[in-house]
Amino acid sequence: MGRIDDTDIREGFRTRRLTTEDLDQYNALLRYAFQVTEMDLKKAGWKDDEFIQSKFPILERADVLGCYDDEQLVSQVAVYPIEMDIYRRIVPIGCVTSVSTYPEYSGRGIMSRLLYQSLHDMRERGQVMAILFPFSIPLYRKFGWEIISNKISYIIKDNQIPNRKRKEKGYVRRVDWDDVDFMGLHMEFAGQTHGCLLRNAAAWDEYWRWESEDTMVAVYYNEADKPLGYMVYMISEDVMHIKEMIYLSREAYNGLWEYIRAHYSMIDEVRGNTYYNEPIAFDLEDGDIKESIRPYIMGRIVDVREFFPHYHCDPTEEDSLITFEVEDDFLEWNNGEFTVSFSKGNCTVVDGPGDFRVRLSIGTLTTLLMGYKTAAQLHRMERISGDILSIQAIDEILLHETPYISDYI
């Protein structure tokens, strides 16, 4: 597949970059594909003209590629530029979103070409990883994406809310959505949390896009007035809904739960989400709560050769050479052998054979390097081919943290 820019996919179709002049067609396709109704907009507090205007930043900040049948936009893909913390290294990535096609144009290879071109352009921009929220895991697996993070949802009855015997000395303050302490706290958290996105203006816009005006932000401060944690929540029909809770210390964690408990007389239960990939039941005195886990974000390495120099491995390991035989049926530049030198935390693609060798798909390589699964786990699932010494060597060299990704872009 070659580069696409104002060229035909098939006779009668052409592709080009979208601008703000294409806003109406972009918005119409997005709303049709995701069935965003007027009722949905009203429930979220949007007026139709406000919703349309809110799309301007997408077309200004993102790289949006569309396919046209004559003058009608029939398919589109948008890529937000953003940065991600990958084992304490800040890495430029692309968030793929607004993937949509009118049903009568499906099955014609249009979306495949748009995704290919979007990944090609990400490679040129130096965005070495692509992530997305999948509407179909099997579909995106065909294009090389794989699951890299989970979302855990929980329901806690009012009598199960933790009652800490030792009260923290700090305090909680409710703040505005654009509060400096709140946004700065997330940036600090993201800079030390594997997988977390460093939210730029576009990411913050999407974070709040569907939130009600009743959504609130509470920040925990220690005795020295330093912000150490926050929670984004809403109370509706006697239920506290927690969108996100992050904390830099155990003190902040306890302090935020004390704040939740202070609402005891107002609520019957707490419903929330966590992205730490750790069930919270064990940490509760009454751990008999409802928890559910589901895959959340999928990722794929855009350029294997350029990804590894951004990657951070175990700094205590020295001079190990591993050859990865990568199968990528979608991006030809990733399909081949890559020998990587792992030394004191740094990774370099080098020439020649490695001391160890494994064979795996691009999706499996992505979930392995992002820490969602270990080499041993993937080997047992027959997702990696290689001898046991090679598998053990990989797990000794790599760091093992599951990504925290709470954004839905």
Image (cartoon, rainbow, N blue to C red):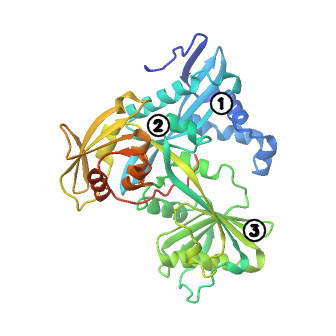
Report if residue 370 is visible in the image.
no
Residue 81 is situated, as x and y percent measured from the top left of the image, at: 47, 41
The residue that label 1 is drawn on is 26
Label 1: state its secondary structure: helix
- The circle on residue 144 is 2
Residue 267 is situated, as x and y percent measured from the top left of the image, at: 76, 74
Residue 82 is situated, as x and y percent measured from the top left of the image, at: 47, 45
Q: Quadrant of residue 216?
A: bottom right
Residue depicted at x 47% and y 59%:
187
Residue depicted at x 50% and y 61%:
186
Label 2: state its secondary structure: loop
Q: Is residue 215 above or below residue 209?
A: below
Looking at marks 1 and 3 on the same chain, the residue that comes earlier in the sequence is marked by 1
The residue that label 3 is drawn on is 239
Residue 230 is situated, as x and y percent measured from the top left of the image, at: 56, 68
Report if residue 165 is visible in the image.
yes
Separation (CA) of disc 1 from disc 3:
36 Å
